[in-house]
Amino acid sequence: MNSRVSVIGAGNVGASLAQMIVQSGISDCVLFDIMEGVPQGKALDLSEACPLWSSASSIKGTSSYEDTAESDVVIITAGFPRKPGMSRDDLLTANAEVVSTVAQNAAKYSPDAVFIVVTNPMDVMTQVAFVKSGFKHEKVIGMGAILDSARFRTFVAWELGVSCQDVEALVLGGHGDLMVPMPRFTTVKGVSITELLSADRIDALVQRTRQGGAEIVVLLKTGSAYYAPAASAFEMVKCILLDEKRMLPCAAYLNGQYGVNGYYAGVPVVLGRSGVEKIIELKFNEQEIADFDKSIKSVQELVQKLGI
Ligand code: APR
Protein backbone atom coordinates (compact mmCIF):
# COMPACT_ATOMS: atom_id res chain seq x y z
CA MET A 1 0.00 0.00 0.00
CA ASN A 2 1.22 3.50 -0.83
CA SER A 3 2.04 5.94 1.95
CA ARG A 4 -0.57 8.58 2.60
CA VAL A 5 0.24 12.20 3.38
CA SER A 6 -2.54 14.63 4.29
CA VAL A 7 -2.01 18.32 3.74
CA ILE A 8 -4.41 20.43 5.79
CA GLY A 9 -4.96 23.83 4.21
CA ALA A 10 -5.09 24.04 0.43
CA GLY A 11 -3.80 27.59 0.21
CA ASN A 12 -0.46 28.74 -1.15
CA VAL A 13 1.77 26.63 1.09
CA GLY A 14 -0.54 23.58 1.16
CA ALA A 15 -1.14 23.43 -2.59
CA SER A 16 2.57 23.93 -3.38
CA LEU A 17 3.43 21.12 -0.98
CA ALA A 18 0.76 18.85 -2.46
CA GLN A 19 2.31 19.48 -5.87
CA MET A 20 5.76 18.50 -4.60
CA ILE A 21 4.37 15.31 -3.08
CA VAL A 22 2.51 14.08 -6.16
CA GLN A 23 5.10 15.30 -8.65
CA SER A 24 7.79 13.34 -6.78
CA GLY A 25 5.54 10.27 -6.65
CA ILE A 26 6.69 9.61 -3.08
CA SER A 27 3.21 9.13 -1.66
CA ASP A 28 -0.50 9.49 -2.20
CA CYS A 29 -1.88 12.79 -1.00
CA VAL A 30 -5.08 14.08 0.57
CA LEU A 31 -5.58 17.84 0.30
CA PHE A 32 -8.04 19.21 2.89
CA ASP A 33 -9.56 22.66 3.25
CA ILE A 34 -12.75 24.06 4.76
CA MET A 35 -13.24 26.17 1.64
CA GLU A 36 -15.50 23.72 -0.21
CA GLY A 37 -14.43 23.34 -3.87
CA VAL A 38 -10.88 24.65 -3.47
CA PRO A 39 -9.16 21.41 -2.37
CA GLN A 40 -11.30 19.42 -4.82
CA GLY A 41 -10.42 21.76 -7.71
CA LYS A 42 -6.70 21.88 -6.94
CA ALA A 43 -6.57 18.10 -6.48
CA LEU A 44 -8.30 17.54 -9.82
CA ASP A 45 -5.86 19.91 -11.50
CA LEU A 46 -2.91 18.09 -9.89
CA SER A 47 -4.36 14.68 -10.86
CA GLU A 48 -4.45 15.84 -14.46
CA ALA A 49 -0.77 16.80 -14.24
CA CYS A 50 0.27 13.35 -13.01
CA PRO A 51 0.39 11.73 -16.49
CA LEU A 52 2.75 14.51 -17.59
CA TRP A 53 4.95 13.97 -14.55
CA SER A 54 4.79 10.16 -14.99
CA SER A 55 3.63 10.02 -11.40
CA ALA A 56 1.64 7.13 -9.99
CA SER A 57 0.60 9.14 -6.93
CA SER A 58 -3.07 9.76 -6.38
CA ILE A 59 -4.47 12.94 -4.86
CA LYS A 60 -7.89 13.58 -3.37
CA GLY A 61 -9.29 16.99 -2.48
CA THR A 62 -11.73 17.05 0.41
CA SER A 63 -13.46 19.00 3.15
CA SER A 64 -14.13 15.89 5.21
CA TYR A 65 -11.65 14.71 7.84
CA GLU A 66 -12.70 11.11 7.26
CA ASP A 67 -10.80 11.18 3.97
CA THR A 68 -7.55 11.88 5.83
CA ALA A 69 -7.85 8.62 7.79
CA GLU A 70 -4.74 6.49 8.32
CA SER A 71 -2.30 9.09 7.10
CA ASP A 72 1.38 8.44 7.75
CA VAL A 73 2.14 12.15 7.88
CA VAL A 74 -0.20 15.13 8.36
CA ILE A 75 1.04 18.62 7.56
CA ILE A 76 -0.86 21.53 9.05
CA THR A 77 -0.73 24.65 6.88
CA ALA A 78 -4.27 25.84 7.65
CA GLY A 79 -4.64 29.34 8.98
CA PHE A 80 -4.03 32.92 8.04
CA PRO A 81 -0.85 34.24 6.46
CA ARG A 82 0.81 37.56 7.24
CA LYS A 83 0.01 40.84 5.50
CA PRO A 84 2.47 43.75 5.25
CA GLY A 85 3.15 45.28 8.68
CA MET A 86 2.19 42.10 10.55
CA SER A 87 4.62 39.94 12.47
CA ARG A 88 4.13 36.18 12.69
CA ASP A 89 3.01 36.74 16.29
CA ASP A 90 0.05 38.88 15.19
CA LEU A 91 -1.56 35.68 13.92
CA LEU A 92 -1.55 34.08 17.37
CA THR A 93 -5.19 33.81 18.49
CA ALA A 94 -6.85 33.28 15.12
CA ASN A 95 -4.43 30.58 14.05
CA ALA A 96 -4.47 28.87 17.47
CA GLU A 97 -8.20 28.24 17.01
CA VAL A 98 -7.68 26.83 13.52
CA VAL A 99 -4.76 24.60 14.58
CA SER A 100 -6.68 23.33 17.64
CA THR A 101 -9.58 22.16 15.50
CA VAL A 102 -7.35 20.68 12.83
CA ALA A 103 -5.10 18.83 15.29
CA GLN A 104 -8.01 17.26 17.17
CA ASN A 105 -9.76 16.10 14.02
CA ALA A 106 -6.67 14.88 12.21
CA ALA A 107 -5.46 12.99 15.31
CA LYS A 108 -8.82 11.26 15.60
CA TYR A 109 -8.56 9.81 12.10
CA SER A 110 -4.79 9.23 11.96
CA PRO A 111 -3.67 8.25 15.45
CA ASP A 112 -0.34 6.87 14.22
CA ALA A 113 0.67 9.81 12.04
CA VAL A 114 3.58 12.18 12.45
CA PHE A 115 2.36 15.80 12.45
CA ILE A 116 4.33 18.62 10.87
CA VAL A 117 3.17 22.14 11.70
CA VAL A 118 3.76 25.04 9.31
CA THR A 119 1.11 27.55 10.45
CA ASN A 120 2.53 30.65 12.16
CA PRO A 121 3.56 31.58 14.78
CA MET A 122 4.97 28.13 14.15
CA ASP A 123 6.66 27.18 17.44
CA VAL A 124 3.54 28.08 19.39
CA MET A 125 1.20 26.41 16.89
CA THR A 126 3.30 23.24 17.17
CA GLN A 127 2.74 23.34 20.92
CA VAL A 128 -1.01 23.78 20.31
CA ALA A 129 -1.01 20.78 17.94
CA PHE A 130 0.95 18.71 20.48
CA VAL A 131 -1.50 19.49 23.30
CA LYS A 132 -4.65 19.06 21.22
CA SER A 133 -3.58 15.90 19.40
CA GLY A 134 -2.65 14.05 22.59
CA PHE A 135 0.30 12.61 20.61
CA LYS A 136 3.76 11.95 22.02
CA HIS A 137 5.91 15.04 21.55
CA GLU A 138 8.33 13.21 19.24
CA LYS A 139 5.51 12.88 16.70
CA VAL A 140 4.58 16.56 16.55
CA ILE A 141 7.27 18.65 14.88
CA GLY A 142 7.47 22.21 13.62
CA MET A 143 8.79 23.38 10.26
CA GLY A 144 10.65 26.66 10.50
CA ALA A 145 14.32 26.15 11.12
CA ILE A 146 14.81 24.31 7.81
CA LEU A 147 13.28 27.28 6.03
CA ASP A 148 15.33 29.83 7.95
CA SER A 149 18.45 27.78 7.29
CA ALA A 150 17.62 27.54 3.57
CA ARG A 151 17.30 31.33 3.45
CA PHE A 152 20.65 31.75 5.21
CA ARG A 153 22.21 29.23 2.79
CA THR A 154 20.88 31.21 -0.17
CA PHE A 155 22.24 34.54 1.07
CA VAL A 156 25.64 33.05 1.95
CA ALA A 157 25.87 31.44 -1.50
CA TRP A 158 25.06 34.74 -3.23
CA GLU A 159 27.57 36.63 -1.09
CA LEU A 160 30.40 34.21 -1.85
CA GLY A 161 29.41 33.47 -5.44
CA VAL A 162 29.32 29.72 -4.75
CA SER A 163 26.65 27.11 -5.39
CA CYS A 164 23.96 27.00 -2.70
CA GLN A 165 24.39 23.22 -2.79
CA ASP A 166 27.78 23.62 -1.13
CA VAL A 167 26.45 25.75 1.72
CA GLU A 168 25.10 24.19 4.90
CA ALA A 169 23.61 26.41 7.58
CA LEU A 170 22.01 26.24 10.99
CA VAL A 171 19.41 28.70 12.18
CA LEU A 172 18.04 27.74 15.59
CA GLY A 173 15.68 29.04 18.30
CA GLY A 174 12.18 30.32 17.62
CA HIS A 175 10.93 30.91 14.06
CA GLY A 176 10.40 34.62 14.66
CA ASP A 177 12.29 37.88 14.39
CA LEU A 178 14.62 36.70 17.18
CA MET A 179 15.65 33.47 15.41
CA VAL A 180 19.32 32.60 15.87
CA PRO A 181 21.41 32.13 12.71
CA MET A 182 24.61 30.33 13.73
CA PRO A 183 27.58 31.53 11.64
CA ARG A 184 30.02 29.19 13.46
CA PHE A 185 27.97 26.20 12.28
CA THR A 186 27.38 27.55 8.78
CA THR A 187 29.85 26.15 6.30
CA VAL A 188 30.86 26.03 2.66
CA LYS A 189 32.09 22.50 1.98
CA GLY A 190 33.02 22.19 5.65
CA VAL A 191 34.70 25.61 6.01
CA SER A 192 32.94 27.86 8.52
CA ILE A 193 31.81 31.20 7.08
CA THR A 194 33.61 32.87 9.99
CA GLU A 195 36.78 31.95 8.01
CA LEU A 196 35.41 33.24 4.71
CA LEU A 197 33.54 36.48 5.46
CA SER A 198 34.07 39.57 7.58
CA ALA A 199 32.02 39.99 10.78
CA ASP A 200 30.17 42.92 9.18
CA ARG A 201 29.13 40.93 6.12
CA ILE A 202 28.04 38.01 8.31
CA ASP A 203 25.95 40.40 10.41
CA ALA A 204 24.25 41.72 7.28
CA LEU A 205 23.41 38.19 6.12
CA VAL A 206 22.12 37.27 9.59
CA GLN A 207 19.83 40.32 9.55
CA ARG A 208 18.54 39.53 6.08
CA THR A 209 17.80 35.95 7.18
CA ARG A 210 15.89 37.17 10.25
CA GLN A 211 13.85 39.42 7.98
CA GLY A 212 13.64 36.84 5.17
CA GLY A 213 9.92 36.18 5.58
CA ALA A 214 9.04 39.85 6.00
CA GLU A 215 11.03 40.76 2.85
CA ILE A 216 8.73 38.51 0.82
CA VAL A 217 5.57 39.75 2.57
CA VAL A 218 6.47 43.31 1.55
CA LEU A 219 6.97 42.26 -2.06
CA LEU A 220 3.85 40.10 -2.35
CA LYS A 221 1.59 42.52 -0.43
CA THR A 222 -1.27 40.01 -0.17
CA GLY A 223 0.31 37.07 1.64
CA SER A 224 3.52 35.41 2.69
CA ALA A 225 6.16 33.12 1.21
CA TYR A 226 5.12 29.67 0.07
CA TYR A 227 7.55 27.94 -2.30
CA ALA A 228 10.44 27.67 0.18
CA PRO A 229 8.09 26.90 3.12
CA ALA A 230 6.52 24.10 1.07
CA ALA A 231 9.93 22.80 -0.02
CA SER A 232 11.06 22.79 3.62
CA ALA A 233 8.01 20.80 4.71
CA PHE A 234 8.57 18.43 1.78
CA GLU A 235 12.13 17.80 2.97
CA MET A 236 10.70 16.72 6.32
CA VAL A 237 7.99 14.55 4.73
CA LYS A 238 10.60 12.75 2.63
CA CYS A 239 12.88 12.22 5.60
CA ILE A 240 10.03 10.72 7.65
CA LEU A 241 8.51 8.50 4.94
CA LEU A 242 11.87 7.15 3.81
CA ASP A 243 13.21 6.93 7.39
CA GLU A 244 16.28 8.82 6.22
CA LYS A 245 17.50 9.78 9.70
CA ARG A 246 18.92 13.05 8.43
CA MET A 247 20.10 15.71 10.84
CA LEU A 248 17.81 18.64 10.16
CA PRO A 249 16.95 21.76 12.16
CA CYS A 250 13.29 21.44 13.24
CA ALA A 251 11.12 22.73 16.05
CA ALA A 252 11.24 19.93 18.62
CA TYR A 253 9.83 19.66 22.12
CA LEU A 254 12.64 20.36 24.57
CA ASN A 255 12.69 18.34 27.74
CA GLY A 256 15.68 19.88 29.47
CA GLN A 257 17.87 20.08 26.35
CA TYR A 258 19.43 23.52 25.85
CA GLY A 259 18.15 24.39 29.36
CA VAL A 260 14.54 24.53 28.10
CA ASN A 261 11.71 22.57 29.63
CA GLY A 262 8.34 22.02 28.00
CA TYR A 263 8.55 24.28 24.95
CA TYR A 264 9.18 23.84 21.23
CA ALA A 265 12.16 25.49 19.54
CA GLY A 266 14.36 25.01 16.51
CA VAL A 267 17.26 22.66 17.25
CA PRO A 268 19.15 20.05 15.21
CA VAL A 269 17.33 16.72 15.35
CA VAL A 270 17.62 13.31 13.76
CA LEU A 271 14.41 12.84 11.80
CA GLY A 272 13.07 9.41 10.87
CA ARG A 273 9.95 7.31 10.51
CA SER A 274 8.93 7.79 14.13
CA GLY A 275 9.46 11.56 14.08
CA VAL A 276 12.15 13.20 16.19
CA GLU A 277 14.45 10.31 17.04
CA LYS A 278 17.16 12.34 18.73
CA ILE A 279 17.92 15.94 19.65
CA ILE A 280 21.51 16.97 19.00
CA GLU A 281 22.89 19.23 21.71
CA LEU A 282 25.54 21.66 20.52
CA LYS A 283 27.93 23.50 22.78
CA PHE A 284 27.07 27.19 22.43
CA ASN A 285 29.40 30.08 23.25
CA GLU A 286 28.22 32.89 25.53
CA GLN A 287 26.76 35.03 22.78
CA GLU A 288 24.94 32.07 21.25
CA ILE A 289 23.48 31.14 24.66
CA ALA A 290 22.25 34.72 25.17
CA ASP A 291 20.68 34.89 21.69
CA PHE A 292 19.07 31.46 22.01
CA ASP A 293 17.63 32.28 25.45
CA LYS A 294 16.19 35.56 24.18
CA SER A 295 14.57 33.79 21.25
CA ILE A 296 13.08 31.06 23.48
CA LYS A 297 11.76 33.68 25.88
CA SER A 298 9.69 35.22 23.09
CA VAL A 299 8.20 31.78 22.27
CA GLN A 300 7.44 31.17 25.96
CA GLU A 301 5.66 34.53 26.25
CA LEU A 302 3.34 33.65 23.36
CA VAL A 303 2.61 30.19 24.75
CA GLN A 304 1.79 31.74 28.12
CA LYS A 305 -0.41 34.37 26.44
CA LEU A 306 -2.46 31.55 24.94
CA GLY A 307 -2.61 29.79 28.27
CA ILE A 308 -1.79 26.33 26.97
N1 APR B 1 -9.42 24.13 8.43
C1 APR B 1 -8.83 23.90 7.24
N2 APR B 1 -8.34 24.87 6.46
C2 APR B 1 -8.45 26.13 6.89
C3 APR B 1 -9.05 26.45 8.14
C4 APR B 1 -9.54 25.38 8.92
N3 APR B 1 -10.13 25.58 10.10
N4 APR B 1 -9.00 27.80 8.29
C5 APR B 1 -8.39 28.30 7.20
N5 APR B 1 -8.07 27.29 6.36
C6 APR B 1 -7.43 27.36 5.05
C7 APR B 1 -7.90 28.52 4.20
O1 APR B 1 -9.17 28.25 3.61
C8 APR B 1 -6.77 28.64 3.18
O2 APR B 1 -7.05 27.90 1.99
O3 APR B 1 -6.04 27.57 5.18
C9 APR B 1 -5.55 28.01 3.90
C10 APR B 1 -4.41 28.99 4.12
O4 APR B 1 -3.92 29.33 2.87
P1 APR B 1 -3.32 30.76 2.53
O5 APR B 1 -4.27 31.81 3.01
O6 APR B 1 -2.92 30.75 1.09
O7 APR B 1 -2.03 30.85 3.47
P2 APR B 1 -0.58 30.21 3.18
O8 APR B 1 0.26 31.19 2.48
O9 APR B 1 -0.75 28.85 2.63
O10 APR B 1 -0.02 30.12 4.67
C11 APR B 1 -0.57 29.22 5.61
O11 APR B 1 1.52 28.87 6.71
O12 APR B 1 3.58 29.91 6.42
C12 APR B 1 2.43 29.86 7.18
O13 APR B 1 2.16 32.12 8.00
C13 APR B 1 1.64 31.17 7.12
O14 APR B 1 0.13 30.66 8.92
C14 APR B 1 0.26 30.72 7.51
C15 APR B 1 0.18 29.30 6.92
Image (cartoon, helix red, strand yellow):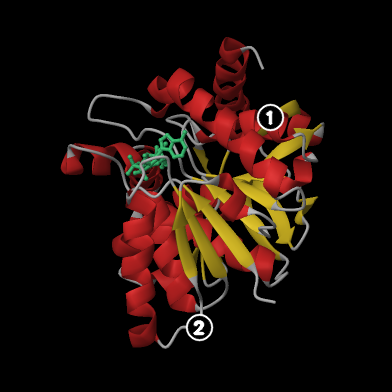
Give left or right: position of 54 versus 144: left
Q: Nearer the viewer, residue 293 or 22?
A: 22
Expressed as whole percent of the image width and height from the top left, the position of residue 226 reads: 34, 51
Q: Mark 2 highlights which residue?
A: 56
Quadrant of the rendering where the N terminus is positioned: bottom right
Q: Decide: marks 2, 1 in contact (CB < 8 A)?
A: no
Residue neighbourhood size for the residue with mark 1, other residues' Cα within 10 Å, grouped as few (<14), some (14–19), many (≥20) = some
> Taking 210 as reference, is 53 above or below it?
below
Q: Which residue is mark 1?
A: 132
- Residue 171 falls left or right of residue 177: right
Q: Position of residue 146 (x, y in %)?
A: 52, 53
User: What's the residue at 71%, 28% (across, down)?
Assistant: 131
| Quarter location, residue 207 | top left
Label 2 and label 1: CA atoms lie apart by 34 Å
Mark nearer the viewer, 2 or 1: 2
What is the number of callouts on the image? 2
Q: Is residue 270 left or right of residue 78?
A: right
Question: What amino acid is found at the position of numbered circle 1 in the picture?
Answer: Lys
Q: Secondary structure at mark 1?
A: helix
